[in-house]
Image (cartoon, grey):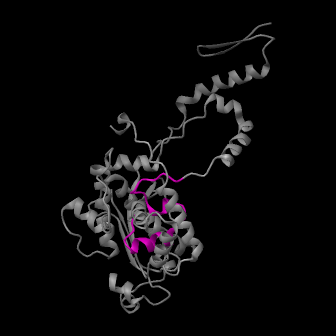
Amino acid sequence: MMVFLAHAATFVRVTPRRSARVASRVATRAQRSLFCSLAEPEPPTQYPVAALAWDLETTGLDTSTAEIVQLSIVCVNSARETPPVFTRLVMPKHDVPAEAAAVHGWTRDRLADEGAEDFASVWAEAQQWLDDSFPSTSPLVWAAHNGHNYDRPILLRHIAEAAQPAPRVARWVDTLHFARRAIRPKRYGPGQYTLGRLYSDATGESLAGAHDAEVDTRALGRVWRWLVEEVDDAPLKFQSYLQREAYPPPAPAPSAAAEAAGDDAAPERRRKRRAAPKVGVALDDDAALDELPGVGALISTRLQSRGIECVGDLRRLYDEQGRDYKAMRSAMRKMLPGVNFMAINKLVAGVRASAEAPEPEPEPASAAA
């Protein structure tokens, strides 16, 4: 017996030897194709991405205790004549130390006079502003200068303590890390990658009114675009860069051999990882401090306050100590008073491992081009 299933110009031959299940599946596919032209149009694969530069003014350098006194968010790529801006003052729970007030000028009395509110109220207002300013389908890319080590930990801690929802984020960007990677030749010494220095590089002007959160966010927006469009090795139009950041290319599919191996290869991979010898960490001199084993957000902030801004600065200090572990540990204890002894040991061990690591192989010329 022989059966033909017909649909338009599609004929499927089903013999007794073929499964009825196969015939049903083929017929279903043919039926689906009939209605494909009548279906709703598929949504776009990408929506326009919004770029948000943001900054905090706080009561101190310790990310575990610093309180926010001012929050500002500015949309960098808005097509409106007046880009969306959110700037609010926040009343801290404790007094503002004199050294912090000397930097940004905010004291509890002045904040009270200006109508500062508690963080929970300010953040609820910020969330409403985000919802009103940007469609729910638009991914948001947030950029702060030294945000990975400082601003972001402080903001997320405040959000958690206030039991508020986290912000809508497609990607966090740190323009300090970006600048260290992109600017060539490399710069050494304190103050080379500050927001003020980069703003001057980008515009040829000095940054007036620094340490006001809104002034800093507007300056950051200019620096961010400059790094993307003019400085980076592979410059892009700013919107193209944002789309790439929010919609990274999918990971490559596993090879046929890897799929065939399946879970059977996992124990062998684990054995290889356990058996691999511990070697030094190969990092560029301009790598961020928190990329070094043993360096967390607190130690990174403390080191930066002493003029140590990248891995290369630590390596040079290690060389000045004659590459002697004990001498480096003593130098770190003097530079970081009050830091746990075990944390100092981990830091020095990470510096030593990094200094003794083999240099990373240069990229092929074709890749660099």
Residue 336 x, y percent position in the rendering: 47, 77
Q: Residue at x 31, y 67 (%)?
A: 195
- Vertical placement of 4 versus 224: above or below? above
User: Of residues 29 and 266, which is closer to you in this image?
Assistant: 266
Find residue 253 and report its horizontal and vertical position in percent. 58, 35
Count of numbered badges drawn on the protein: 0
| Most frequent secondary structure within the magenta stretch | loop
Q: In this view, does 18 lie above or below 190?
A: above
- Inspect the magenta stretch and tell me whether residue 290 lies in it: yes
Q: Which of 327 and 83 is in front in this view?
A: 327
**Vertical position of residue 341 compared to residue 293: above or below:** below
Q: List the single residue furthest toward the top.
A: 1
Toward the left, the furthest residue is 204
* 261 drawn magenta: no
Q: Is residue 228 left or right of residue 293?
A: left
At 32% from the left and 67% from the top, the residue drawn is: 194
In the rendered image, residue 324, in percent from the top left (x then y), is placed at 48, 65
Is 309 left or right of 154, judged from the image as shown? Answer: left
The answer to whether residue 273 shows anywhere in this view is yes
Q: Quadrant of the N terminus?
A: top right
For the C terminus, the image quarter is top left
Q: Is residue 248 left or right of residue 212?
A: right
Q: In this view, does 354 lie above or below 25?
A: below
Start-end of magenta stretch: 280-309
Q: Kindly tell me whether residue 166 is visible in this rendering.
A: no
Image coordinates of residue 186 in percent, x first then y, are: 31, 55
**In the displayed image of the protein, which residue is found farthest to the bottom?**
109
Pick the residue in front: 330 or 162: 330
For this view, does 219 lie left or right of residue 56? left
